[in-house]
Amino acid sequence: MPLQRRLPKRGFRSPNRREYAVVNLSKLEKHFEVGGTVDPNSLAKTGLVRKGVEVKILGSGTLTKALNVKAHGFSQSARERITAAGGSIEDLNRA
């Protein structure tokens, strides 16, 4: 059997790939108070993510509190739900 068939396949991983720690809106609803600021440091203090990772907010769940959210990425549904609840969004990649 030829050598290329005997060796295991290896996938491709882009060197420019960004990996995010994801947090759903339902977790923000549970762990933060009205008017609170959500940033990667406060998420690390609550134990939702590890310290020093990039954070992406996903729109799973409901959000009824007005929060000031600072993260490296947002899904479109998360943006809509945070602003609909009266909160604000700051994208740390563009700041």
Image (spheres, rainbow, N blue to C red):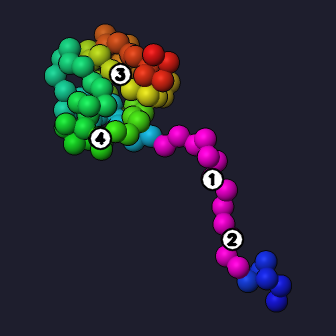
Residue 76 lies, in percent from the top left, at 50, 24
- The residue to which callout 4 is attached is 51
- Residue 62: image quadrant is top left
- Decide which of tag 2 and tag 4 comes sooner along the chain: 2
Could you give the CA–CA distance between mark 2 and mark 3, rounded to whole angstroms?
A: 40 Å
- Side of 63 relative to 15 (left or right): left
Residue 95 lies, in percent from the top left, at 45, 16
Residue 14 lies, in percent from the top left, at 64, 47
- Can residue 59 be seen in this snapshot? no
Element type at mark 3: strand
- The residue to which callout 1 is attached is 13
- Decide which of tag 1 and tag 4 comes sooner along the chain: 1
Could you give the CA–CA distance between mark 1 and mark 3, rounded to whole angstroms?
A: 28 Å
- Decide which of tag 3 and tag 4 comes sooner along the chain: 4
Q: Amino acid at mark 3?
A: Lys
- The residue to which callout 2 is attached is 9
